[in-house]
Image (tube, rainbow, N blue to C red):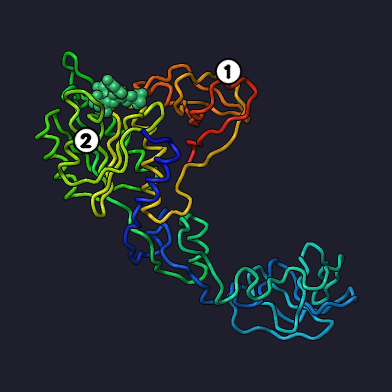
Amino acid sequence: MISVTEAQQLIIQKAKLLDTFTLNLEDAFGYFLAEDLTAPINLPSFRQSAMDGYAFIHTDKTELKVVGQVQAGDTQIPDLKKGEAIRIFTGAPVPDAADTVVIQEHTTRNGDQLILDKLPHKEANVRPIGEQITAGTYVLKTGHQINEASLGFMAGLGFTKIEVYRKPSVTILTTGNELQKPGTPLKPNHIYESNGIMLKSALGRIGITKVQNLKAQDTLEATKKAVKNALQQSDVLLVSGGISVGDYDFVQEALLSNGVKEHFYKVNQKPGKPLWFGTSEEKSIFGLPGNPASSLTAFYVYVLPHLRSRMGSLLPFLNERKAELTEDITNKIGKTLFLKAGVADTKITAYTGQASSMLNTYALSNALLVVPETETDLKAGDVVNYMDLSF
Ligand SMILES: Nc1nc2c(c(=O)[nH]1)N[C@H]1C(S)=C(S)[C@@H](COP(=O)(O)OP(=O)(O)OC[C@H]3O[C@@H](n4cnc5c(N)ncnc54)[C@H](O)[C@@H]3O)O[C@H]1N2
Ligand code: MOO
């Protein structure tokens, strides 16, 4: 059995970058950039007024003569001499000779006479060429995850297409004879299948939408066949259940017999101990424990960073933060604990109801409190690490 740290290293080491492709800017939200972009133009590319007011050549005089006007988008720009002013608007080009813009609230206008009630400092309210970025310098680098601000920034520089890493297609294979689709009365000793929808929406949160759900009964033949199909159809396979040591747990055998190379099986943690991870050429395969809370924890701690890494992220793990414990916690089992928890105002509380089958507390959690395997007694007031589930 390996440690959480070793398992986290392995899922990153084995994360092969997906191929790249060119994408229209308007479709690029959430993708990771696969090129270093340099600015094709200066931003701004001309001297711009930052305010509505008057452009002039800086002087100690407080009375100027208004000799013209310039509006945003104008291509004919009026000239001016010392002692003169040009009416100007936000975003308009500042006349070459002018070096300062006074905001209109600091002036009094009588016909073409302009009184400066408050003299601005020289160069006030003039955005110099290249103030934001100069042509030829880096805009954004490989690995940047495209957000609304970066989209606006790139559009402002005139980009229409960029190179990004592809997102993976994923098959979620749920195994178990006891599983029944919600929507029909529950048969005796069956349970409603819930990991499929949970994992699919967790994938959606990291922008992966090409997801199919398959299911298999608990036989070696059915599991092998389903694994084979899934491997032909997707970049990533998440198998749920059937990975423990029972007589009807066939997932490990089915994966190995389909040529998947095992990188680890079992991690020294609770929940999620019987986690399995392997690869087959360009494909990644996780055998997730069937218990719903174990499955989701394994997703947050391993599947999510592995997939983000494959999609080009340089910071693939969930953010780890610190908070103060509200209650004592003991850890007598020598494993890393991931506890469903709530964080508010820098304080963290592990919820009652930590069993691997329980999603009731997970549904209310915004944090996974991490208790290291070496930590036996934590006291109220101790500062602990948690993984931020608000991502
Ligand atoms: N002798 C041992 N038994 C078990 C061990 C062990 O070390 N020795 N480990 C336990 C741990 S820890 C876990 S976690 C589970 C993992 O078992 P499996 O991955 O084989 O999962 P299943 O047995 O198929 O299911 C476990 C549990 O979860 C329910 N389940 C399964 N799939 C779904 C689904 N899609 N939606 C909702 N619920 C699901 C299933 O009915 C079971 O109750 O093994 C322990 N056993
Ligand atoms: O580790 Mo299992 O995931 O406790 O239920």
Do the numbered discs 1 and 2 sit on residues whose CB atoms are within 8 Å?
Answer: no
Q: Residue at x 51, y 70 (%)?
A: 157
User: Disc 1 on helix, strand or loop?
Assistant: loop
Between residue 97 and residue 154, name the one nearer to us. Answer: 154
Three-letter amino acid code at disc 2? Gln
The tag on residue 328 is 1
Measuring from the top left, give residue 66's x and y in whole percent.
78, 78
Measuring from the top left, give residue 356's x and y in whole percent.
36, 22
| Mark nearer the N terminus (1 vs 2) | 2
Between residue 235 and residue 377, name the one nearer to us. Answer: 377
How many C-alpha atoms fall within 10 Å of the one at disc 1: few (<14), some, or many (≥20)?
Answer: few
Identify whether 134 is placed above or below 365.
below
Q: Residue at x 37, y 33 (%)?
A: 267
User: Disc 2 on helix, strand or loop?
Assistant: helix
Three-letter amino acid code at disc 1? Asp
When asked about the image quadrant of residue 252, the answer is: top left
Measuring from the top left, give residue 21's x and y in whole percent.
33, 65
When asked about the image quadrant of residue 276, the answer is: top left
Q: Is residue 149 left or right of residue 217?
A: right
Quick one: which residue is furthest to the front in this view?
1
Q: Is residue 144 left or right of residue 165?
A: right
Disc 2 beta carbon < 8 A from ligand 1?
Answer: no
Residue 89 shows up from this direction:
yes
Measuring from the top left, give residue 265's x and y in whole percent.
31, 36
Q: Which residue is mark 2?
A: 252
Between residue 214 and residue 284, name the one nearer to us. Answer: 284
Q: Residue at x 29, y 40 (%)?
A: 286
